[in-house]
Image: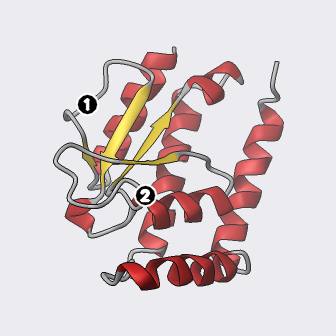
Amino acid sequence: QVVKNAQLLAQELKNGGLTIVGGKTECHLIVVDLRPLALSGNIVAEALEEACIVLNRNSVPNDPAPPFYPSGIRLGTPGVTTRGMKEKEIRLIGKWILSVMDHVKEEKLPEDKEKRGAFMKNFRNRIRKDKFLKRIASEVKALCKKFPMP
């Protein structure tokens, strides 16, 4: 079920316009290349975490960005599968991920390396108050209450 959920989530993200490294997944992990959308892994990961969806920023093949500010994200399905989530919930999680990414698509990491830290600090402060992300977070929490940890 873990792999089935990962494959479905990868397909949902791909259908939403994201680039999956390798085109698909054959295991529990999905790596998304954000370069075609000109998004930063840091920005996406921080925004999704504020929305209570936790994943990692991750370098992608031939990533021109430094490892601390990579061009991708990595996510997996063992946690949600352990809770008992299946296809219906995976589609909803994919929708949330895509909507959060769309919400932050105008946020651009500065080219100037010296300005990146200040930008990320300001970004974190702004998203803590973001009503859209708070709404998604409350929906995520409500779903998780229906699927408690075993």
Which residue is outermost to the top?
1
On screen, 61 above or below 105?
A: above
Q: Residues within 10 Å of mark 2 (few under 14, many from 20)?
A: few
Helix, strand or loop at disc 2? loop
Is 85 on the left or on the right of 68, as rendered?
right
Which residue is outermost to the left?
62
Q: Residue at x 59, y 36 (%)?
A: 89
| Residue at the spot of label 2 | 68
Q: Which quadrant of the structure image shows residue 55?
A: top right
Instruction: Return the x and y of residue 91 as percentages of the image width and height.
Output: 49, 40
Q: Residue at x 83, y 39 (%)?
A: 145
Indicate the amino acid at tag 1. Answer: Lys
Q: Residue at x 45, y 78 (%)?
A: 116
Indicate the amino acid at tag 2. Answer: Phe
| Residue at the spot of label 1 | 24
Disc 1 versus disc 2: nearer the observer: 2
Q: Which quadrant of the structure image shows residue 7?
A: top left
Q: Which quadrant of the structure image shows residue 126?
A: bottom right
Q: Residue at x 48, y 67 (%)?
A: 43
Assign the C terminus to one quadrant of the image.
top right
Instruction: Return the x and y of residue 97 as percentages of the image width and height.
Output: 49, 54
Is 146 on the left or on the right of 119, as rendered?
right
Q: Residues within 10 Å of mark 1 (few under 14, many from 20)?
A: some
